[in-house]
């Protein structure tokens, strides 16, 4: 194992402690990207062969780099996406970790390997991030000096196991916040429409249903959202 960088397997308690610290910051982080960036940087610090790292996520059926330790990892990832081949995509597709041979001996993903080698990459290791029986992304590790060994693999697998749960939890947390925001906007829209209906009912001497129908017709005629018509009524008293 390399000396001076990374945590020896025998120091598993220190390794677990660092991962625990990362997980504890999850819900205090305003943005998932900040958390995932720390994940990428920590993998470089803890995994001996890793010199640059990224976290790819699956979103709307597409794979993209959500965070990285530096721009090099992002460029190497992009070579995979552009050509539809590489260890990251294979790890996500198969749900199994993919470790490359030294790039000067690797026969898979020829276009990707050629481009990655031109970036100075000598080896790669991609670990799928799985949670709730689904693959949510991949942890991509790149070495500039050598291929990854068994010791690197053991640390990588342990790291990814923790990171996968954190990524899934972060995703769920931020989706819940987004849902809450949408619900809040829906409630505001309902209140505006209710106020607008009240104004129209009073001025036109019509029922609530008739007032709503008037708002709806204006919305359709002007091709604007019902909320916008309601807001205009509340602000100006005008709807025609």
Image (cartoon, grey):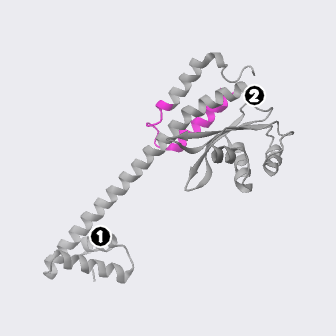
Q: Secondary structure at mark 1?
A: helix
Q: Is residue 32 left or right of residue 138?
A: left
- Predominant SS along the magenta part: helix
Image position, residue 124 (x, y; %): 74, 38
Element at badge 2? Answer: loop
- The front one of 196 and 81 is 81
Label 2, residues with CA under 10 Å away: few <14, some 14-19, many ≥20: some
Left or right: 29, with 53 as reference point: left
Q: Quadrant of the N terminus?
A: top right
Whole-percent x and y of residue 157?
A: 63, 31
From the viewer's side, name the closer residue of 50 and 95: 95
Q: Which label number is shown at residue 231?
A: 1
**Can the viewer see residue 238 in this picture?**
no
Residue ranking furthest to the right: 104
Q: Position of residue 83 (x, y in %)?
A: 74, 55
What residue is drawn where x is 27% and y is 64%? 190
Q: Residue 157 lies in magenta, yes or no?
A: no
Q: Residues within 10 Å of mark 1 (few under 14, many from 20)?
A: some
Sequence order check, earlier mark of 1 and 2: 2
Quadrant location of the C terminus?
A: bottom left
Is there a contact, CB below 8 Å, between mark 1 and mark 2? Answer: no
Q: Which residue is mark 2?
A: 149
Q: Residue furthest top?
A: 10
Residue shown at 82% from the left, 36% from the top: 102
Is residue 107 depicted above or below 41 in this figure?
below
Judge from the rendering whether residue 182 lies leftward or rightward of residue 18; answer left or right: left
The magenta stretch is 23-47
Where residue 107 sits in the image (x, y, percent)?
Answer: 84, 44
Which is more foreground, mark 1 or mark 2? Answer: 2
Q: Residue at x 72, y 48 (%)?
A: 75
Q: CA distance from mark 1 to mark 2?
A: 63 Å
Residue 221 seen = yes
């Amino acid at each position: 194992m390399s000396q001076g960088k990374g945590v020896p397997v025998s120091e598993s308690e220190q390794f677990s402690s660092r991962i625990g610290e990362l997980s504890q910051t999850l819900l205090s982080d305003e943005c998932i990207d900040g958390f995932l960036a720390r994940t990428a940087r920590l993998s470089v610090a803890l995994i001996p062969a890793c010199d640059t790292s990224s976290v790819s996520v699956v979103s709307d059926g597409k794979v993209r780099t959500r965070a990285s330790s530096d721009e090099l990892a992002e460029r190497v990832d992009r070579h995979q996406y552009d050509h539809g081949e590489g260890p990251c995509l294979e790890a996500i597709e198969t749900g199994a970790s993919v470790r490359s041979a030294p790039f000067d001996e690797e026969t898979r993903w020829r276009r990707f390997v050629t481009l990655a080698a031109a970036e100075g990459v000598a080896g790669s290791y991609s670990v799928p991030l799985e949670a709730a029986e689904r693959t949510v992304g991949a942890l991509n590790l790149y070495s500039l000096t050598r291929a990854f060994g068994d010791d690197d693999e053991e640390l990588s697998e342990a790291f990814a196991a923790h990171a996968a749960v954190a990524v899934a939890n972060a995703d769920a947390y931020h989706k819940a916040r987004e849902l809450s925001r949408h619900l809040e906007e829906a409630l505001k829209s309902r209140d505006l429409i209710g106020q607008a209906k009240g104004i129209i009912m009073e001025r036109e001497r019509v029922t609530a249903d008739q007032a709503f129908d008037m708002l709806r017709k204006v919305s359709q005629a002007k091709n604007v959202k019902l909320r916008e018509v309601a807001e205009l009524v509340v602000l100006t008293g005008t709807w025609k």
